[in-house]
């Protein structure tokens, strides 16, 4: 059975939307029939006023936004019922407290006990009405996974004893882990692979890109031999370019660097290498802020955009907007937009980085680059989802290949979206050659290791201050 993640996600969204509306309705009726008679000393007719309709139209969307911000809908096929219980309890508490202070607190009451009762009953109503449908949906999904009705396309990197051992162990489990083995990838070229007796040989590491794309791979299990340990860095760097779950057998844990978490698959312990660098709620807020800030920046900059467009047209021939292919998150190419600051055909002799006194840059282009006005169109890339406000500056594949040949860990920068500004840009400025790009890279690696909304705000503030001071960044 094929997985349809969007369809499954929609089940949770519809369930949560109905739960939000239903819990508010039941709570409203409870207040009318129990809380208000105590306050007034007589029965109150059950009428639905403005406060009810305000809640019924707004609160379901409020709950969906809260769940989205905390990443509840992110990975719908790998939910734990116990984890879901704790998450629903915590999110219900946060949401109910917000609703209480924004909607319920202004009610006139007889005693403060009415407040305590109101918030308690709203919590109880919303939690059970939300959690029970979630439990049913998740339980049904888990049963389908355990019965092998649903599976995650999985590939094993490795081809000998350890690969065979992990394959047999996972396949022998009575309750499936969800791994649907498509085949394996060899690390070193040799004659004959033990794992080929069980699953197809798909190719070597050089074929990784085509294999993940062709077979829609969702999970990769690394099960290499001790003699192949020297390849682990190359494998991890390659896999970081893809949005797949990476798991590895524990005995090579000490070789890995970075964030990892233990994952036990029904008796088969594996280490899962996490792609998550920020807490989910920060990641969602960063995404929303990217869109809001970019839209505001483009609106506020309209006079500057107009002046820049006129200046470019009057001072040199060619288009106003310069387009160039850059490499973004997971190694995906995208078209970067900038105001043109160079003469047309500036790179007719091949790709070259701009230098401080580069005669390819027009006089007006020098002004655009110094003031960073040339990068205002980058905000269009942010709105399109190719970039973020803060992140490592995107580079061309031509230069990335040169950097990776000398510093393979550069690929770790592709864990995140490239940015309009970056720690490396603020600390180092423009790089004029590959050596300087490698030097600047260490600041961007530091950013990834310390990524947070707090760090993003600091980088944005320093960027603005440097532009205002006229410093070259």
Image (spheres, helix red, strand yellow):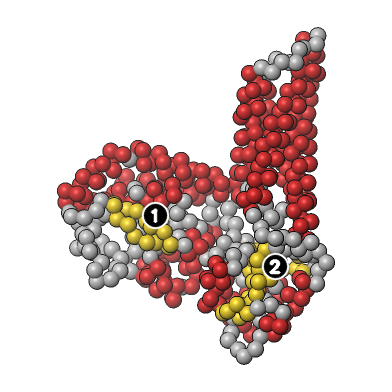
Front-most of residues 113 and 160: 160
Residue 178 drawn at (x, y percent): 72, 63
Seen at 63% across and 18% down, the residue is 50
Seen at 78% across and 28% down, the residue is 121
Q: For marks 1 and 2, give the CA distance.
A: 46 Å
Residue 324 drawn at (x, y percent): 34, 60
Neighbour class for label 2 at 10 Å: few (<14), some, many (≥20)? some
Provide the secondary structure element on which disc 1 rests.
helix
Q: Which mark is residue 289?
A: none
For label 1, the residue is 426
Residue furthest bottom as drawn: 191
Q: Which mark is residue 180?
A: 2
Describe residue 353's horizontal placement relative to residue 424 as left or right. left
Residue 440 drawn at (x, y percent): 41, 64
Front-most of residues 305 and 408: 305
Mark 1 or 2: in front is: 2
């Amino acid at each position: 059975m094929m997985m349809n993640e969007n369809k499954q996600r929609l089940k949770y969204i519809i369930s949560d939307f109905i739960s939000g509306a239903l819990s508010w309705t039941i709570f409203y009726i409870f207040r009318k029939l129990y809380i208000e008679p105590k306050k007034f000393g007589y029965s109150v007719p059950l009428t639905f006023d403005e406060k009810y309709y305000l809640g019924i139209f707004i609160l379901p969307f409020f709950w969906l936004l809260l769940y989205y911000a905390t990443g509840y809908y992110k990975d719908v096929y790998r939910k734990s019922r116990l984890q879901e219980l704790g998450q629903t309890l915590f999110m219900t508490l946060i949401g109910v407290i917000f609703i209480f202070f924004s909607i319920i607190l202004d009610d006139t009451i007889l005693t403060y006990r009415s407040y305590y009762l109101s918030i308690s009953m709203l919590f109880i109503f919303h939690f059970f009405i939300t959690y029970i449908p979630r439990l049913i949906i998740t339980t049904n999904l888990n049963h389908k996974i355990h019965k092998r009705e649903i599976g995650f396309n999985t590939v094993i990197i490795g081809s000998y004893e350890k690969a065979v051992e992990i394959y047999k162990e996972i396949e022998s489990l009575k309750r499936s882990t969800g791994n649907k083995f498509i085949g394996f990838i060899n690390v070193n070229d040799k004659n004959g692979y033990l794992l080929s007796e069980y699953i197809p040989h798909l190719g070597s590491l050089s074929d990784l890109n085509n294999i993940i794309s062709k077979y829609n791979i969702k999970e990769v299990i690394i099960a290499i031999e001790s003699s192949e340990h020297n390849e682990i860095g190359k494998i991890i760097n390659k896999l970081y370019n893809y949005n797949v779950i990476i798991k590895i057998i524990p005995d090579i844990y000490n070789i890995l660097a970075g964030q990892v978490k233990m994952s036990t698959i029904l008796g088969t312990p594996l280490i899962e290498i996490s792609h998550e660098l920020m807490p989910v709620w920060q990641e969602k807020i960063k995404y929303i802020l990217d869109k809001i800030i970019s839209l505001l920046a483009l609106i506020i900059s309209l006079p500057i955009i107009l002046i820049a467009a006129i200046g470019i047209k009057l001072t040199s021939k060619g288009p106003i907007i310069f387009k160039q292919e850059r490499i973004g998150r997971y190694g995906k190419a995208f078209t970067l937009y900038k105001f043109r600051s160079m003469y047309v055909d500036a790179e007719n002799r091949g790709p070259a980085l701009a230098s401080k006194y580069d005669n390819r840059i027009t006089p007006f282009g020098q002004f655009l680059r110094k003031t960073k006005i040339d990068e205002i169109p980058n905000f269009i890339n942010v709105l399109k989802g190719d970039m973020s406000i803060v992140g490592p500056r995107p580079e061309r594949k031509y230069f990335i290949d040169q950097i990776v040949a000398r510093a393979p860990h550069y690929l770790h920068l592709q864990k995140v979206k490239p940015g309009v500004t970056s720690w490396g840009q603020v600390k180092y400025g423009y790089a004029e050659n590959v050596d300087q790009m490698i030097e600047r890279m260490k600041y961007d690696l530091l950013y990834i290791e310390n990524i947070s909304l707090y760090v993003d705000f600091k980088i944005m503030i320093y960027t603005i201050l440097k532009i205002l001071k006229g410093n070259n960044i």
